[in-house]
Image: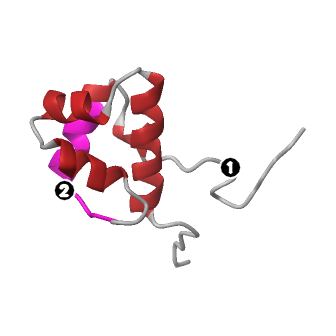
């Protein structure tokens, strides 16, 4: 059986997508924090590339509900992140 290898940490992919979808919805990190019942600082830590704070599946699920986005979409790496930059 072939081993699955990720070029980018799944947490990094998720944190970038959380931030992207939050901004697309026009939400601040404070508004997202309130919607999921977490502190604003905690949401900022989740989204931070520097802090690299890990989070639970329950938190991941609550954020996906608040953003109206499936967990699969939040975990999906873009083609650039996967290293297959397809330009047409």
| Front one among 11 and 28 | 28
Residue 71 lies, in percent from the top left, at 35, 40
How many numbered marks appear? 2
Crowdedness near tag 2: few (<14), some (14–19) or many (≥20) residues, C-alpha within 10 Å: few
Circle nearer the N terminus (1, 2)? 2
Residue 32 or residue 60, whichever sits in front:
32
**Closest to the observer, 1 or 26:** 26
Q: Are marks 1 and 2 in contact (CB under 8 Å)?
A: no
Q: Residue furthest left?
A: 37
Q: Which residues are magenta?
A: 52-65
* Distance between the alpha carbons at the discs numbered 1 and 2: 26 Å
> Which image quadrant for residue 74?
top left
For label 1, the residue is 79
In the depicted structure, whether residue 44 falls above or below residue 25: below
Image: 62 above or below 83: above
Left or right: residue 17 versus residue 46 is right
Q: Which secondary structure type mostly characterizes the magenta part of the structure?
A: helix
Residue occupying the point 47% across, 54% down: 13
Residue 63 colored magenta? Answer: yes
84 with respect to 8 (left or right): right
| Secondary structure of residue under mark 2 | loop
Q: Does residue 35 lie above or below 41 as drawn? A: above
Q: Is residue 82 left or right of residue 77?
A: right
| Number of residues whose C-alpha sits closer than 10 Å to that of mark 1, classed few (under 14), some (14–19) or many (20 or more) | few
Magenta run includes residue 7: no
Q: Which residue is mark 2?
A: 56
Q: Position of residue 28 (x, y in %)?
A: 32, 29
Residue at point 32%, 27% (across, down):
67
Percent across and percent down for residue 55 are 22, 58
């Amino acid at each position: 059986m072939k081993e699955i290898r990720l070029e980018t940490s799944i947490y990094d992919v998720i944190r970038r997508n959380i931030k992207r979808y939050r901004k697309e919805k026009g939400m601040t990190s404070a508004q997202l924090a309130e919607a999921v019942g977490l502190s604003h600082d905690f949401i900022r830590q989740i989204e931070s590339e520097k802090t690299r704070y890990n989070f639970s599946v329950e938190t991941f699920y609550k954020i996906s509900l608040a953003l109206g986005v499936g967990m699969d979409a939040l975990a999906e790496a873009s083609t650039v992140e996967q290293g297959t930059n397809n330009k047409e």
